[in-house]
Amino acid sequence: MSGAAVTVEGMSKASAPSGDELLKVLSALGNPHRMRIIAALSEGRNYVSALAREIGMGRPLLHMHLQRLEAAGLVTGSLELSESGKAMKYFELSPFSYVLTPDAVAEAARTLTEDEKTTVKESAS
Amino acid sequence: MSGAAVTVEGMSKASAPSGDELLKVLSALGNPHRMRIIAALSEGRNYVSALAREIGMGRPLLHMHLQRLEAAGLVTGSLELSESGKAMKYFELSPFSYVLTPDAVAEAARTLTEDEKTTVKESAS
DNA sequence: GACACCTGTCAAAGAAACCTGACACATGTC
DNA sequence: GACATGTGTCAGGTTTCTTTGACAGGTGTC
């Protein structure tokens, strides 16, 4: 949808991510809890409550962090039914790959939307 | 100073950054203004006041952001004397390189110091 | 001296991120 | 029904980040 071209299978390739995308990924990863969640998930998929117990944090909090990670496209969640009929939300890592170099960041920065706080406004002439 | 082994010239190589280091880099880069600063600096070194005018932000703010970037090892500042004797602080990009993949993040997360907030307290029994 | 430029810092306001406890809803077992 | 498991959300307080304006200092020129 923007900038780059490379599009491998269902995997986001690192070639020239849009500024907004990179920004979302970086701010999502720039948090100790979220990094730890990635680590926990790297050992296999798991559902929220179990994950919460494993990492030792409240469910509401975990839920919110997972949401942030999912919004950045780093993890994927899917609601499934267990054998007993209980609904469980399983999360797993999405295969991502980003390269951080001065030029890569600079390049992405130029495509930053900046403040999309400009809800409406911008048509004078 | 930690984990990895690779050590090229005077450049921080991406092999296995410590959790704390990666965290600092990611949170430093996860900010639109800071990304834009990197972009501006990618076109050459510059001093604070000029940079502030170019990007369009207050000096105190820029100063603070540059400090954050420098603390993460992404830019370098050096106070120099201009011909006229004026003191100018020039900043320039440091050559960094980090690879972001699920495993790389997970690996780094395991070496997280987390809360060094344990100032004092912890001795009941 | 008054003005231009540069450097740095501080305090207080504002915004955004974070975290917690309580609540809602399901299901299956004793 | 009472209890365990799972899901989700919301209000509110706390903490951290961001931003601004005012101030300190320095230099050199008119």
Image: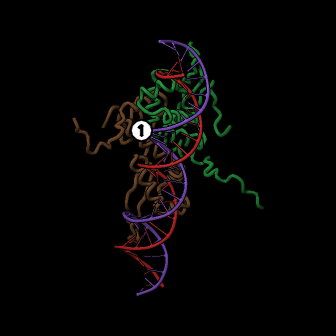
Chain colours: A green, B brown, C purple, D red
Q: Chain of mark 1?
A: B
Residue toward you, B77 or A71: A71
- Which residue shows up at 51% across the image and 61% down it? B52
- B83 relative to A77 in the view: left or right: left
**Residue B48: image location, x then y, percent:** 46, 61
Is B64 situated above or below B31? below
**Residue A5: image location, x then y, percent:** 65, 34
- Which residue shows up at 28% across the image and 45% down it? B119
Badge 1: residue crowd in 10 Å (few <14, some 14–19, many ≥20): many
> Residue B56, located in which quarter of the rendered image?
bottom right
Is D4 situated above or below A120? above
- Which residue shows up at 46% across the image and 54% down it? B65
Q: Residue furthest right?
A: A125
The residue that mark 1 highlights is B22
Residue toward you, D4 or B89: D4
Of helix, strand and loop, which one carries label 1?
helix
* Observer able to see residue B8: yes
* Observer able to see residue B43: no
